[in-house]
Amino acid sequence: MTSKTLRALCISLLLVSPVLPAHSAPPPAAAPLTLQQAVEQARLSNPSLMATRKHVSATRSTAITAGLRQNPNLTLLGQGVTLPDINPIGNPYYYSANFSRLFERGQKRRWRLDSATATVDVTESQYSDQERQVVLSVRQAFTNLLVAKEAVALSNENLTDYRKTVALTKARLDAGDIPRNDYERVDLQLAQFESDADNATLNMMQASAQLRMLLGIDGSARTIDIVGTLDPPVIQTNVSELEARALASRPDYLAAQQSVRLAEANAKYAIAGGTADPTVAAEYERSGIDNTFGVSVAIPLRIFDRNQGEKERTRFEIDSSKFALVAAHNQVVSDVDQAWFALDAALRQAHRYNDHYLEEAGRVRDNLQFSYRNGNATLLDYLEALRDYRAVHLSSLNANAQVWLAIHQLSYATATDIVP
């Protein structure tokens, strides 16, 4: 068989061979979420925020209604009309057309519109405040999930390392170097390490579920991957600057200021409500062969009811809103001060663990582990070193987490990003 014949045969086999369906490639794994991405997703997809946004839009519609003018009225009337085949002589007929409109005095429309606009402003600030609370919850849940992931890694590391110790102890038992009682005491401690790993995994799953709920992710997605660090950052600011930023940015404080303006607009509308609104009407009448035209003005006499109750109520509402503004100002300053004190304490504690105790606990554990495995340290000393290392490592992890939680609380208190 020549080479040309062999090449032709191969081409023919390729043409007639069935084409097997290609296996679809698995979808690429979603990239881990950063903290900023999680916050942005919550702003867009959190169901509570979506519901409040719709409420804000509904509130804006009230400003349209408040700015509308009074509709005129048209009245048509016909009387004494008979058909010719019933009454050949016919009766004198009568019909009329009346056109009337109420005119508001005291600038009611202006103050009504001001009140509606102020209500919209307050509602929008309340939405911003709710968004601020959701962002805080997302940041806290994100940090808790980071802590849970670190705790899982730590517990698995401790479990793996201790299993090696159990295996080495079993080998010493088989070699007759130690009694069975010593081996069983080592083996019993394995249950504590396994329990730590299980609890850490449970905490991670619960933290993941909390973050998914805040991000608006349904329950079908069982896991969510995040990426971030728990290393304490450098904070370059002071409490006085943070207080000024909070007073300029806090939406709840802005809502308190807007509530004063709303109360003042309601008071002006209540004063305008004590004025009389005339109704002007024009009427055309035809009775038989006579045509008439008339004009009338109806003015309610505000002798008894001059809206005194609303005027008094709104005056007290102004005073109440001003006191609420002072309380909001004090609350802002207090929130910033408390968050700043908590951050300062958390930073000092984290630095103590990260700069001294964590390294020291690891060194003690490694030395006693080596000594015990070579028969130069007692079991009690080794187990005590393991407990100290686990406790110090978890305390260091929690101290770093407390720094970030304090940063998130301070960002919440100032309505700004302390760490961009």
Image (tube, rainbow, N blue to C red):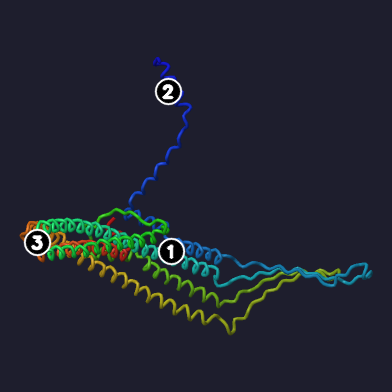
Local crowd size for mark 1, using a 10 Å CA cut-off: few (<14), some (14–19), many (≥20) = some
Q: Which of the two discs, 2 and 1, sits closer to the camera?
A: 2
**Quadrant position of residue 225:** bottom left
Q: Secondary structure at mark 3?
A: loop
The residue wearing badge 1 is: 48
Q: Amino acid at mark 1?
A: Ser
Q: Considering depth in this image, is 27 or 144 the residue closer to the camera?
A: 27
The residue wearing badge 3 is: 178
Q: Position of residue 278 (x, y in %)?
A: 63, 74
**Quadrant position of residue 262:** bottom left
Picture layout, residue 151 above or below residue 95? above
Q: Which of the two discs, 1 and 3, sits closer to the camera?
A: 3
Say whether residue 179 is left or right of residue 109: left
Q: Position of residue 358 (x, y in %)?
A: 14, 60
Q: Amino acid at mark 2?
A: Cys
In terms of sequence position, does the residue under pointer 1 or pointer 3 come before the other?
Answer: 1
Marks 1/3: CA distance? Answer: 63 Å
Label number found at residue 181: none
Question: Which quadrant would the N terminus be assigned to in this image?
Answer: top left
In terms of sequence position, does the residue under pointer 2 or pointer 1 come before the other?
Answer: 2
Q: Position of residue 326 (x, y in %)?
A: 34, 74
The residue wearing badge 2 is: 10
Local crowd size for mark 3, using a 10 Å CA cut-off: few (<14), some (14–19), many (≥20) = some
Q: Secondary structure at mark 1?
A: helix
Marks 2/1: CA distance? Answer: 65 Å
Residue 128 appears anywhere in the view: yes
Residue sitting at x 34%, y 75%: 327
Q: Secondary structure at mark 2?
A: helix
In the orientation shown, which residue stands out farthest toward the bottom?
Answer: 304
